[in-house]
Amino acid sequence: MGRLLRRTGIVGLGLLLVVGFLSGDVLFPNVVYGGDPYPDRELQQLMKELGVARREFGSVKKSKVSETELQAASDRLATDEERIRRRSLQLAKEYPNTKAELSVLYWVAGKWPETVEGKHALETLIKVSATANIEHLGQTFDVIHASRKESMRPLVPVLLQRERENSNHPYAAKLLTEACFFLVTDQGTVVPDEFSRIADIFVERHATSPKLANFCELLGGGEPWAQPFESHLRRILDVNEDRYVRVSAHFALASIVRSHGASRQEEAQEIYQAYLKDFDGQTIYLAQGIEQDNRQETKQILKIMSRHGIGMTAPETIGVDLDGTPLSLKDYRGKVVLVSFWATWCKPCIDAIPHERDLLETFGDSDFAIFGVNADKDIEKAKAAIKEHDISHGVH
C-alpha cells in the first residue's frame, strides 16, 4: 500500500499546494477547487480529527492500562469516528453535484466500508458518479485515495462506462487507473479478466495519455501476476512522451522482466542500467522525487542482482549451530537449499514447521536440504522449541 499511496494523486507541488498525509492514508490538498462552494477547511479538519483520535487510541493501546481503560478508549474512538462519518455525509448533502460531494463520499466509502455510513456513501457515490462531471470525478481520484481498495469494486462498472462515454477526455485514463487499483488485492493478485480488459483499453485508446503513471506503477511491484502486461508497458514506452509516465513504465518493465526468472536476469539488469542513464533525477517537475526514489531503488536492486541474483551461486554463509559446532552453507552445495529464518517468538515461523517437514519428506534429503537460521537471543528457548515441535531438519 505505501508505495502505491505515495504515488497516487498530487505529488511534489509543495510550492503551490499544502499536501499532507492525513488519517494515515489519505492525500488531501489545502486548496479550494475553482468555482465550487467547497467545504475545504471543514473536511480537512474532520480528517485531522480522525488522525488525532486514532493516534490517541494507539497511545493508550501501547501503554500499560487496564482492560476497562482500554475499552473506554476504544469506545471514545468509535464515538469520534461515527461523528466524523455522519458530519462528512452531511457535507456531501450540503454540496450536491460538486467535487465536494464526490470527495466526501469517496473518502467515507473507502475509509469505513463496513459501516452503515460507508455503505451509504458507496451507494450514493455509484449513483452520482454515473452522471458527474468527468473532470470532477477524475480530480477526486487525484487528491483522495481509498483506504480499502477491494471494497470499492462495485464502482468499477461505472468508471468503465464513463470512460466509454468520454474516451477522448483527458481524465478518461485516470478513471481506468482507479478501476485497476480497485481490482488489485492486498495480497498482490488481480481479477484477471477485468484487469486485462482495462489494460488492453489503455493500449488501444490511451497509450499517449499523461495519466498513465499510476497504472504503470501498479505493474511495477515485481509480482508474477503483472508478467502478462509486459507488452502493454513496452507499447506505452514506444509512444508516450510524458516524463512521469516514462519513468513509471521503464521501472515497471524492469521489475516484470526480473520477475521472469534466471533466463532474463541479464536483460533486467540492462533495463535497470538504462533507467539510470535516461533518468538522472535532476529535472524539476511533478514527479522528480519519484524519479529520484526509483534511482536509489534501482541502484540497490542492481547491487543485489550482482551478488544474490537468481541463478547465481549463493554467497558463502558461515556460522555455528545451536550446539556451537561450526557450519557453512557450502556444505550443502549441489542441493536445492531452503534457507529458513525462524525464531520462537515468530508464530508464522512455528506454523511453517509442519510444511517444512512435508517438503523434506516429499523431496528427500539427497538433493534437498533446509538450512535454518535462528534469531532467538536465548539459545535455550530455541533448543526447547526444537524438542517441543520435534524439529529434526535445518535448525542452526
Image (cartoon, rainbow, N blue to C red):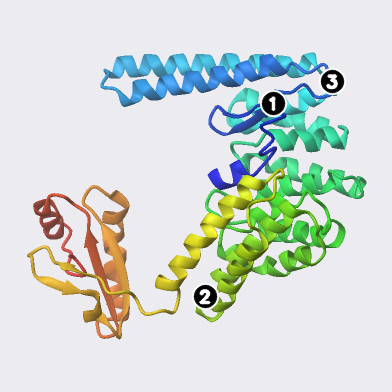
- Left or right? Give the position of 27 relative to 96: left
Q: For the residue marked with disc 1, what is the amino acid?
A: His
Residue 120 tag number: 1
- In the rendered image, which quarter is residue 21 located in? top right
Which circle's residue, 2 or 1, is located before the other in the chain?
1
Residue at (82%, 30%) from the top-left corner? 128
- SS label for mark 1: helix
- In the rendered image, which quarter is residue 280 located in? bottom right
Mark 2: few/some/many CA within 10 Å (<14, 14-19, 20+): few
Residue 261 tag number: 2
Residue at (82%, 16%) from the top-left corner? 37
Which circle's residue, 2 or 3, is located before the other in the chain?
3
Quadrant where the image shows the N terminus: top right
- Left or right? Give the position of 191 relative to 259: right
- Above or below for 107 versus 87: below
How far from the left and from the top, in percent, is residue 317? 25, 71
- In the rendered image, which quarter is residue 393 located in? bottom left
Badge count: 3
Disc 2 versus disc 1: nearer the observer: 2
Q: Which residue is mark 3?
A: 36
Identify the residue at the far front of this view: 282
Q: For the residue marked with disc 3, what is the amino acid?
A: Asp
- Residue 313 visible in the displayed image: yes
- Above or below for 278 versus 72: below
Calculate the distance from the C-alpha at mark 3 to the C-alpha at mark 1: 23 Å
How far from the left and from the top, in percent, is residue 239? 82, 64
Residue 90 tag number: none
Disc 3 versus disc 1: nearer the observer: 3
Which circle's residue, 3 or 1, is located before the other in the chain?
3
Are the residues at dot 2 and dot 1 in contact (C-beta closer than 8 Å)?
A: no
How far from the left and from the top, in percent, is residue 204? 85, 62
